[in-house]
Amino acid sequence: MMVEHILTIKGPDAANGKPKPLAAGNVLRAIEPAVKATVAMGFRGSSTIRGRMPRWLTAASDIRFVDMSSGDSESTLLHFEAPRFGDVADEVYKQKTLFDIRPNENDTAFNLFADVLVDVGKQDRESERFDSGILRRLERFRAPVFGQGVETLSLYGDRVQKQNPASFDSKLVQLAASLYQETPAPKRVRIAGKLDMIRASDRVFVLILKKGEPVRGVWDRAEVDDLKKLFGQDVVVDGSAVFRPSGGLLRVEVETMSMAGEQDTVFSTLPRPTSRKLDLGKLRKRQTKRSGMAAIYDKWPSEESEHEILAALDEIE
């Protein structure tokens, strides 16, 4: 069963249901990859998939543009359809696990995208609905969409009510950029725990650490048989820890996994970030006559002449 969702484009280039081709085209071009990344995030805890997508995940993110109609005097309505996850990913929902890391089976790709917009708007630094990849995709709406005669995008349909749509504008893009800058850089880690859950269809698993904390991991290069052999065993993984803007662990992207030894119990702890991204924008400050290079140019805090300084440098060489 396909579910209708409506995306309202509001702005001078989208008035009366007659948008300029560039405005409508840029929205359509940007929305699909952002929604697909959101679906991957919802199921796997990662917006990036290396290699071929599972059939069910491709179907779950298969959104279709079906119609366009007139809104008010300043807007155009874009009509989309998307399937419910339970209808196209039944093989995933048949697997019962203690730690459920799947979206609601009645949801659609656009429902998840609306949730992301809400969490970014609230600056939810603990959210599991987005990662750096999704935040960067939201930033990509800045110039081609909101810089081209579009002021606001509003999404509603299904469980997202028309009276309270999920809205998206240049301010939200800035919030996404801010969250991206706050997110700590990934960190190389080694983690030990019990392999408690495996979803072989897309290489998602859960480790249970010594104190009982669950850790979600993805292992894109794994063979299914390798995972099954280790199920229920104490294992140790090497890879990269990916963090939320708050600094909390979001997932582990695994490169290798093997049986753990007694010496590996020391690694059964949650990784912590060591650094955050450098915000180059904050380093750029306007220079005045008394600051920056102007404050030191042509000044030497000593009594030596230029000739004496050059002579000293020659002796060092």
Image: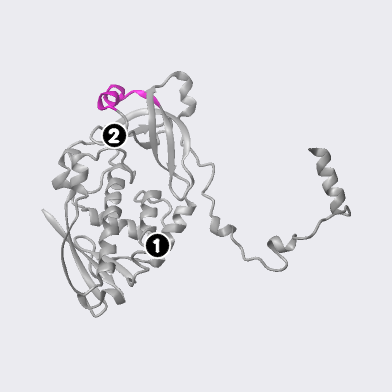
Mark in the foreground, 2 or 1:
1
The answer to which quarter of the image holds residue 136 is bottom left
Q: Nearer the viewer, residue 28 or 158?
A: 28
**Highlighted magenta segment, given as a residue range:** 223-236
Give percent across and percent down for residue 77: 21, 70
Give percent across and percent down for residue 56: 18, 42
Mark 1, residues whose alpha carbon is within 10 Å: few (<14), some, or many (≥20)?
many
At 48% from the left edge and 53% from the top edge, which residue is drawn?
181
The answer to which quarter of the image holds residue 170 is bottom left
At 24% from the left edge and 32% from the top edge, which residue is drawn?
200
Q: Is residue 191 visible?
A: yes
247 horizontally vs 118: left or right? right
Residue 231 lies in the magenta-colored region:
yes
At 24% from the left edge and 69% from the top edge, which residue is drawn?
21
Amino acid bearing label 1: Val
Q: Nearer the viewer, residue 120 or 176?
A: 176
At 30% from the left edge and 58% from the top edge, which residue is drawn?
30
Give percent across and percent down for residue 287: 65, 65
Above or below residue 309? Residue 240 is above
**Colour mode of the rendering:** one colour
31 horizontally vs 68: left or right? right
> What residue is disc 1 on?
173
Above or below residue 243? Residue 173 is below
Above or below residue 69? Residue 271 is above
Query: Which secondary structure, mark 1?
Result: helix
Looking at the image, tell me whether mark 2 or mark 1 is earlier in sequence order: 1
Give percent across and percent down for residue 202: 26, 36
